[in-house]
Image: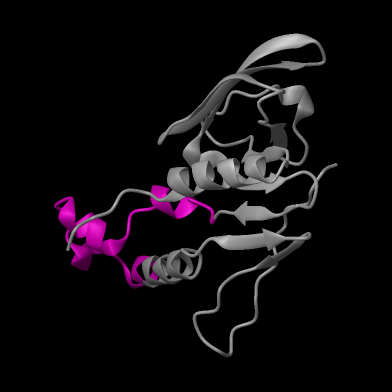
Amino acid sequence: MVEFSNNKPYLLRALYEWILDNQGTPHLIVNADYPEVQVPREHVSNGEIVLNISPGAVQGLALENEEVSFNARFSGVARVIRVPMASILAIIARENSQGMAFPSEESDLILTADELAEDDLAAEELTDEEALLSKELNRIAEDESTPELVSSNKTVKPEKKSNQKPKTSHLKVVK
């Protein structure tokens, strides 16, 4: 089976263009506590920051596969902003909150039992508790693998089973 690259940067670029094509103002919601995030800390609230990435608000915007970077002014001070792709929680239009929330990528930092075995660590060496934890983390990662769609301050996650309820996002739009 062929391993595909992360689709998040492609979705981000497409939604950015879609928001601009509809005369909207694209905003990123970023986990400011994620490693290697470079944002003005004085504008961080509850570990998150909302960044206006419209052409009139930034210079040198680069929507790359590994990170988003640009130059912008915050309270009159020029800043270089760098946010790893994994730190981006959502992209939305300021005008109507339409856009997309992305699943948390914290599960990427956790080794599964299969990955441990591939790293020459025998899966048998896991204690029963560690094996149960690994199974639970894998289940959670599978449940969070589908991007959530955001529209009018409501989040809907496509259902995998008919008896699942849609999840709502903890993200709030700051206008």
Q: Which residue is at 40% across, 36% downward?
A: 65
Whether 163 is among the magenta residues is no
Whether 115 is among the magenta residues is yes
Q: How is the image coloured?
A: one colour
**Looking at the image, residue 162 lies above or below residue 13:** below
Q: Which residue is at 43% across, 68% downward?
A: 142
Q: Position of residue 114 (x, y in %)?
A: 24, 62
Q: Residue furthest right?
A: 175
Count of numbered marks? 0
Part of the protein shown in magenta:
103-131
Residue 34 visible at all: yes
Q: Position of residue 42 (x, y in %)?
A: 78, 23
**Looking at the image, residue 122 lies above or below residue 156:** above
Q: Position of residue 159 (x, y in %)?
A: 55, 78
The answer to whether 129 appears left or right of 53 in the picture is left
State which quadrant residue 162 falls in: bottom right
The answer to whether 47 appears left or right of 89 in the picture is right
